[in-house]
Image (cartoon, helix red, strand yellow):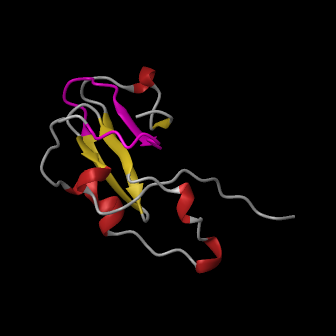
Amino acid sequence: MAPYIFVGFIPKSMTYQGAVQGWKVNGEELTFQNCNGDPNSYIAFFFNPSGQEYTNYYVRKNNTLMYKWYYDASAVAQSDYIPDEFFTNYYEVHQGGCGGYSQGSVVPTAGAVGMQFSEY
């Protein structure tokens, strides 16, 4: 499903069994305890020009850690909108070590990577 952008959440060296990991959503910390030391905490965006479908990978049930980032999302000001062509419906989010896994195919959203900057 190339090309893709891969963004890791934490350094592999900081991942171990029992570590507390997670992310913040609108200032609220959502954490889990890494049950097995799995270092797969990432989001990957697939721009998929060939239209290839996802493989049949197991997606866990809807849990707060994996889905709150879009349930509680805040709308951005129209002046901060990113053009639609920068978004992809093909992405996956993984919080390794028992946190969860989700795909864009089961989430009614699109994803994009961007950087915030200010004008001088």
Q: Going 87% across and 64% down the picture, which residue do you hit? A: 120
Spot the residue most to the top. 13
Is 17 on the left or on the right of 75, as rendered? Answer: left
Q: Going 43% across and 63% down the picture, which residue do you hit? A: 27
Is 76 on the left or on the right of 15, as rendered? Answer: right
Residue 22 at least partly seen: no
Spot the residue most to the right. 120
Please tell me whether residue 21 is drawn above or below residue 78 in the rendered image: above
Q: Quadrant of residue 21?
A: top left
Q: Quadrant of residue 22?
A: top left
Q: Total of numbered circles in the picture?
A: 0
Q: Quadrant of residue 19?
A: top left
Q: Going 59% across and 79% down the picture, which residue do you hit? A: 78
Residue 7 horizontal/vertical position (percent)? 49, 37
Q: Which residues are magenta?
A: 33-54
Main secondary structure found in the magenta portion: loop
Residue 35 at least partly seen: yes
Q: Is residue 25 magenta?
A: no
Q: For the N terminus, give its image quadrant.
A: top left
Please tell me whether residue 15 is drawn above or below residue 98 in the rendered image: above
